[in-house]
Image (cartoon, rainbow, N blue to C red):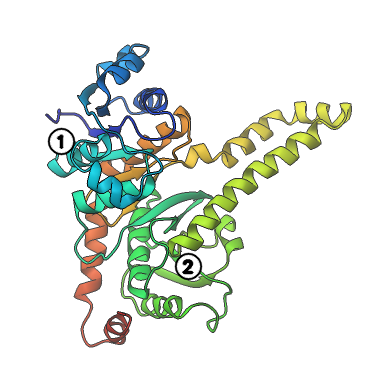
Amino acid sequence: MKKSVSVTIALDAMGGDYGPDVVIPGANLSLLRHPETHFLLFGDEKKIKTALEAYPNLTAHCDVIHTDVSVPMDAKPSQALRQGRHGSSMWQAIKAVKDGSADAVVSAGNTGALMAMAKVGLKMLPGIERPALAAIWPTVKSECIVLDVGANVRASANQLFDFALMGVAMARTIFNFETPSVGLLNVGVEEIKGLEEIKKASNLLKNSELPIEYYGFIEGTDIGLGTVDVVVSEGFSGNIALKTAEGTAKQAVAYLKAAMNRSVLTRMGAFLAQTGFAELKQKMDPRHNNGGPFLGVNGIAIKSHGGTDATGFACAIDLAFDLAQKNILEKIIEDVKIFHNNLNDSAIQKEKLSAYP
């Protein structure tokens, strides 16, 4: 039964590499920041309650719902959907959002399974063809949103356009930007470069009457520079860019640490600059940007990195709380409706129709 609190979040307590050992302390960390949260914990009741023993305050904000099945991290999406659709912790957590018992679901489980179950269980928002996995990306200016980072290997022009709409709605929700800038990730900034679907998507965005500031094509270097607020890509390139950035951040920290320990003088310098290094380390720590929503499904479903720790999982819960409290679904529906209302006999209508395969 949903309680009269600000936000109720369903957690797949068995998801990820560590299950309740990360989910429970992560929920406790998020609760400290958002004490009005209530949690529905789905999974092995015995394991969950054992983990809860160390967190009496969290226990008072939880309901534990036992499930016998958990989705393996290496399961194929179709297999997970077929075998775990009704009894798994992941499915039951998603169902809680569908039934209105929870405002959002967070899972560190199998990405493909979570997307498939969210798509089937929550259905798609009107006017959206496919969900996109979004990520909040640190930049030298502030942060930007990148999508898709892994839900779809390929994407049509229409789907890329939909990703832009949803990314803009998320930027308006998270960053409070009235007209977020949008860029299409491409192999070059020249209009003649790139796949045909990306060129078609560019034409759609140029002719859009939505409150979008379309920048044009951007390259990979533009993401970290903060050239635009929303970066749009199909999932293949987006996921490679994300993983490359995470690896580069770890590489830079390792180089810096080695350089600062090279001699007595460098160690003294590191000691004097420790506050600045601590700030840099936090900005480059992927745990603090952990968690990505599957935008496009009719509910808030957040994917956490499977190997994250409690700090990272807490950040994924924080994102779920923020998106639920700020009504992101209503913003996406509103933007899609405005776009479709503007489809008369304009060039964008013809472009949109011609973009269908």
Q: Quadrant of the C terminus?
A: bottom left
At a point 21% along the width and 23% down the height, the residue shown is 63
Q: What is the secondary structure assignment of the residue under circle 1?
A: loop
Q: Is residue 276 above or below residue 45?
A: below
User: Label 1 neighbourhood size at 10 Å, few (<14), some (14-19), many (20+)?
Assistant: some
Q: Nearer the viewer, residue 19 or 162?
A: 19
Q: Quadrant of the N terminus?
A: top left
Q: Quadrant of residue 349?
A: bottom left
What residue would you read off at disc 2?
183
User: Can residue 141 be seen here?
Assistant: no
On the rendered structure, is 193 left or right of 40? right
Q: Position of residue 209 (x, y in %)?
A: 31, 75
Q: Is residue 219 left or right of residue 84?
A: right
CA–CA distance in space, label 1 to label 2: 37 Å
Name the residue carrying label 1: 101
Q: The residue under label 1 is which amino acid type?
A: Ser
Q: Residues within 10 Å of mark 2 (few under 14, many from 20)?
A: many
Residue ID at (47%, 61%): 236
- For this rendering, which residue is in front, 91 or 127? 91
How far across and down, in percent of the image, does residue 231 sit? 47, 62
